[in-house]
Amino acid sequence: MSPRALVCLSGGVDSTVAALLLKQQGYDVSAITFWFWSFHNAPDYAGATKCCALDTAALAARELGLPHQEIDASEEFHTKVLVDYVTRYRQGETPNPCGRCNRYLRFGYALKYARENGFELVATGHHVRKIVYPDGTFGLARGADANKDQTYFLYGLQQEDLQRLAFPIGELSKEDVFSLARNANLSAAELPESQDLCFAVAGETSFLFPPEAFESGPILNQDGEPLGTHRGLPHYTIGQRRGLAIAAEQPLFVIDIDPRRNALIVGPDTALTRSELTAQEASYLSGKSPQDGAHILVKIRYRSPAVAASFHRLSDTRFRIVFDDPQRAITPGQLAVLYDGDRLLGGGTIEHASETIS
């Protein structure tokens, strides 16, 4: 009897090819797709969301001949991801909902469904590589395609999760994935890649916020002098230059967001660099943090390179990072993800950035 594998099928080319590869390897494959968009007051997405669209997932399942189950997780998505997204923006942060969705919703629900329905394996289309160490423990390494690596979003996985997870396309380049889909005559080969937040409508998420979240307020320089008026703090993030609508002799950037005063603080580009950060909601793949003082690599946003820094444990759930070289626009609410070379160690949510005091 073939081992049973459950594939989290979004309908995109990556998850579709992951399912194809498992079928070719002899697994008894079924597919599951989570539906996140029917919560109260949700806009009419009409099947046009950027990931986990039911119509494209159903088409992929039909073409592969897979049993396909749709699960409505919209209320959980609203509670665990969208409420957090709005709350953090209103607190002056710039949240990372994809990391939170993977950590607190998507993988947990898929693994629970697999346990309850007799699946040995849960697979996704993430560009990451699973490691099995000699002592039987598990880890993750960057995907073979460095431009598509998605370890940044999976820092919250635990050993018990990794035991049952598989990432069939982790050793492939994106072009390899598209080639396999084309050779199998799969419609997913013709789909554009998702680039935006899955719940954004034409790049906008303002519909999630109450009207009072967009109350205008002052734009101040570093000395507290008013320079203009902002359109509501959720429109801005650390490092932003465009959309400030203020005249100045030199380019000005958002260097701080102060929700207590409903104020946007701006300054020159040089004011954006910070040498350290603290992070909360820490999680580590091994179950243990790196050694205090360890020299590691850190990514402070998905598209930024991993840079050298030292790790300092503050508690079970908080850590401090001191960078070898100061970093630009460290943003509260984003993720600080930790690496040892290509190996993912863990991460946390950035809460504060500062200068190191000598």
Image (spheres, rainbow, N blue to C red):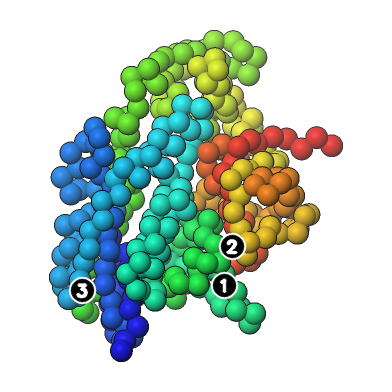
Which residue is denoted by mark 3 in the rendering?
A: 66
Q: Is residue 112 above or below residue 194?
A: below
Which residue is denoted by mark 1 in the rendering?
A: 138
Location of residue 239 in the rendering, given as x and y in whole percent from the top left corner: 53, 34
Q: Quadrant of residue 330?
A: top right
Q: Which three-letter amino acid code belongs to the residue tagged 2? A: Leu
Q: Is residue 356 above or below residue 189?
A: above
Q: Please tell me which residue is depicted at 64% across the width and 30% down the height of the picture.
A: 271
Question: On the picture, is 219 further left or further right than 310?
Answer: left
Q: Are marks 1 and 2 in contact (CB under 8 Å)?
A: yes
Q: Please tell me which residue is depicted at 23% across the width and 42% down the height of the picture.
A: 38
Q: Which three-letter amino acid code belongs to the residue tagged 1? A: Phe
Q: Are marks 1 and 3 in contact (CB under 8 Å)?
A: no
Classify mark 3: helix, strand or loop: loop
Q: Is residue 36 above or below residue 151?
A: above
Location of residue 281 in the rendering, given as x and y in whole percent from the top left corner: 58, 45
Q: Please tell me which residue is depicted at 61% across the width and 49% down the height of the picture.
A: 282
Q: Quadrant of the C terminus?
A: top right
Spatial CA span between label 1 and label 2? 8 Å
Which of the pair 35/142 is nearer the observer? 35
Which residue is denoted by mark 2 in the rendering?
A: 285
- Residue at the bottom extreme of this rendering: 1
Q: Quick one: label 1 or label 3, which is nearer the N terminus?
A: 3
Classify mark 1: helix, strand or loop: strand
Question: On the picture, is 233 further left or further right than 326?
Answer: left
Q: Which mark identifies residue 306? A: none
